[in-house]
Image (cartoon, helix red, strand yellow):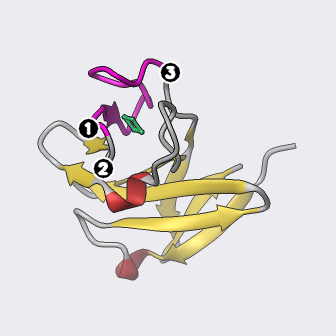
Amino acid sequence: MASWIKVCETKTLNNGDMIDFDHDDKKILISKVKNKVYATDRICTHAYADLSTGFLNEDDITVTCPLHMSRFNLESGKPENLPAEDPLKTYSAESRDGWVYILI
Ligand code: FES
């Protein structure tokens, strides 16, 4: 059953930030763009690359994989260009009472 997991204090996550968050065997990318928090799987669906070492694009709310440059939409998880074809898993995320939570 899914439950809300506390990630970090809201004040430590600024617009344009990406942070790693590991929970059980999940490697998750937490990011913040335009005051909205996003959570997706952190490992690229094309090959093994950690997206937290990629580039956050605030204009189109995507993260660019550092290895072959696929861009993933942080809201939907879908890749916007090849070579990645499969979406990242996404998680609900919210900020409340001074903390960031994700639903896992
Ligand atoms: S490993 Fe990410 S696009 Fe190839």
Q: Position of residue 83 (x, y in %)?
A: 35, 22
Is 76 displayed left or right of 56 in the figure? Answer: right
Q: Is the distance from the Cβ of mark 2 to the nearest ligand 1 atom less than 8 Å?
A: yes
**Pointer 1 with pointer 3, Cβ within 8 A:** no
Q: Are marks 2 and 1 in contact (CB under 8 Å)?
A: yes
Crowding near the residue tagged with mark 2, few <14, some 14–19, many ≥20 C-alpha atoms within 10 Å: some
Q: Quadrant of ligand 1?
A: top left
Q: Give the residue at mark 1.
A: 69
Which residue is more in the foreground, 17 or 86? 86
Quadrant assignment, res 90: top right
Residue at the right extreme, as displayed: 1
SS under mark 2 = loop
Q: Quadrant of residue 27?
A: bottom right
Quadrant of the frame with the N terminus: top right
Residue occupying image coordinates x 37% and y 81%:
11
- Viewer-side label of 1, 3: 1
Q: CA distance from mark 2 to mark 1?
A: 6 Å
Q: Give residue 22's position: percent from left, percent from top.
A: 65, 65
At label 1, the amino acid type is: Met
- How crowded is the residue under tag 1: few (<14 C-alpha within 10 Å), some, or many (20+)? some
**Residue 80 lies in the magenta stretch:** yes
Residue where numbered disc 3 is placed: 86
